């Protein structure tokens, strides 16, 4: 059975390079900017920005499921070591939670927009700030996996295959 | 090589501040540039994508009606404009952070990338390319502004087909450019603490937190 799986390259991946960090561009940028546009829209009374943040939020919600699919495959092939194991566990847990939270936020936003697209309650801004904070924490955890522990980098994969880590 | 270096300094410039840098070659634990890149790429791609959706509005409106999702064409073009505007502003910081972090970058020696380039060549392409991509984003933002506020102010389709075409070409350029950046990290180990420590012969189980 194992021979049916594609061979792994020097990044320990069946494809050229990690795809998860590419997909998360769209989750991070769209989720954060949706909150920023909501704040500007409320503070400066610019309702057209609510439409911009609605679509960005919707896109972030769709993108996070794609990010999770690639994230799970790449996490499974990452061979984390030391404290990276714990960080990867927390990153995975927050990732799945964020998918749920972003879906709920999008659903709430859909209802608000259907009722009155020109206004936004402060409670939604509060929820948006919590989700944005969660996205930032998730970014830091993902950053540590790459920039501190070097998961899926050629050097670390080579060391792993030599049994050095 | 057309020109050989006139002399090789005994000490590389980065050595002057080396004691202040961590194992990752930075005075802080995580690089800033790759995080700002999330914003630059995400905002640019979605800006163009929503202008495409706005431009193709006559084809899609039945789909959105089927989905019971109330939409306006102007709403899609608003996403195209505001996302690009923020992308334009943020990208100056993306490039600035990139240049700062490139000054202290030490690519692993003896590595050749998937593209067949060395570390320094990859950094030079990524650095010069980054400025050109920034210039293109600024140019496209100005172009988009003229379309929105002057040339196509009263038209349903707020953008020219040529603008969308250039946007799609930029997807490819940014994709290639981003791949160079990814190679600097994943292949050359730039600013990756684990890679740099392994190169120095350290044991990661004891050297990393």
Image: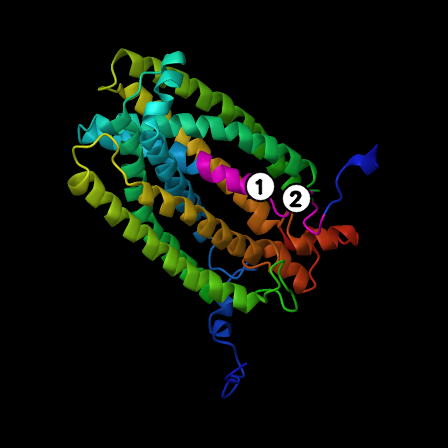
Residue B120 vertical placement versus B195 (above, below)? below
Residue under circle 1? A19
Q: Is residue A24 magenta?
A: yes
Residue under circle 2? A15
Residue B159 vertical placement versus A109 (above, below)? below
What residue lies at 43% left-to-right and 60% top-to-bottom?
B129
Give the residues in magenta. Answer: A9-27
Query: Where does the image place residue B49, in percent across and percent down from the top left?
Result: 39, 36
Instruction: Tell how many labels.
Output: 2
Task: Calculate the distance from the C-alpha at mark 2 to the C-alpha at mark 1.
Answer: 8 Å
**In this image, A130 relative to B82: left or right?**
right
- The circle drawn on residue A161 is none
Residue B124 vertical placement versus A162 (above, below)? below
How many neighbours does mark 1 have within 10 angstroms: few (below 14), some (14-19), or many (20 or more)?
Answer: some
**Label 2 residue SS:** loop
Query: Where does the image place residue B110, in percent across and percent down from the top left?
Result: 66, 69
Instruction: For residue A23, say whether it is visible.
Output: yes
What residue lies at 45% left-to-right and 31% top-to-bottom?
A134
How many neighbours does mark 2 have within 10 angstroms: few (below 14), some (14-19), or many (20 or more)?
Answer: few
What residue lies at 17% left-to-right and 36% top-to-bottom?
B153
Query: Where does the image place residue A125, in percent across and percent down from the top left?
Result: 31, 25
Mark 2 chain:
A
């Amino acid at each position: 059975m194992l021979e049916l799986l594609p061979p792994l390259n020097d990044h320990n991946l069946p494809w050229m390079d990690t795809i998860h960090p590419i997909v998360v561009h769209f989750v991070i940028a769209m989720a954060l900017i949706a909150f920023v546009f909501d704040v500007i829209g409320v503070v400066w009374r610019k309702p057209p920005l609510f439409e911009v943040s609605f679509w960005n939020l919707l896109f972030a919600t769709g993108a996070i499921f794609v990010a999770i699919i690639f994230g799970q495959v790449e996490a499974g092939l990452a061979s984390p070591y030391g404290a990276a194991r714990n960080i990867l566990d927390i990153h995975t847990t927050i990732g799945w939670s964020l998918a749920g939270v972003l879906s709920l936020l999008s659903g709430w936003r859909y209802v608000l927009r259907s009722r009155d697209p020109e206004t936004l309650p402060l409670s939604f801004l509060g929820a948006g700030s919590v989700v944005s904070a969660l996205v930032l924490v998730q970014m830091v955890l993902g950053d540590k996996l790459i920039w501190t522990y070097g998961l899926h980098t050629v050097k670390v994969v080579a060391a792993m295959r030599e049994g050095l880590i | 090589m057309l020109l050989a270096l006139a002399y090789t300094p005994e000490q590389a410039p980065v050595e002057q501040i080396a004691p202040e840098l961590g194992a990752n070659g930075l005075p802080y634990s995580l690089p800033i540039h790759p995080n700002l890149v999330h914003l630059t790429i995400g905002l640019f791609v979605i800006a163009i994508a929503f202008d495409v959706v706005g431009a193709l509005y006559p084809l899609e409106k039945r789909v959105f009606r089927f989905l019971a999702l109330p939409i306006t064409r102007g709403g899609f073009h608003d996403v195209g404009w505001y996302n690009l505007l923020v992308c334009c502003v943020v990208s100056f910081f993306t490039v600035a952070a990139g240049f700062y972090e490139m000054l202290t970058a030490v690519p692993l020696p003896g590595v050749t990338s998937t593209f067949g380039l060395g570390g320094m060549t990859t950094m030079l392409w990524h650095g010069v390319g980054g400025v050109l991509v920034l210039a293109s984003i600024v140019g496209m933002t100005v172009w988009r502004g003229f379309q929105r506020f002057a040339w196509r102010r009263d038209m349903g389709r707020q953008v020219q087909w040529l603008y969308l075409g250039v946007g799609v070409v930029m997807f490819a350029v940014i994709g290639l450019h981003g791949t160079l950046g990814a190679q600097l990290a994943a292949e050359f180990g730039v600013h990756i603490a684990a890679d740099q420590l392994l190169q120095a012969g350290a044991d990661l189980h004891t050297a990393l937190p």
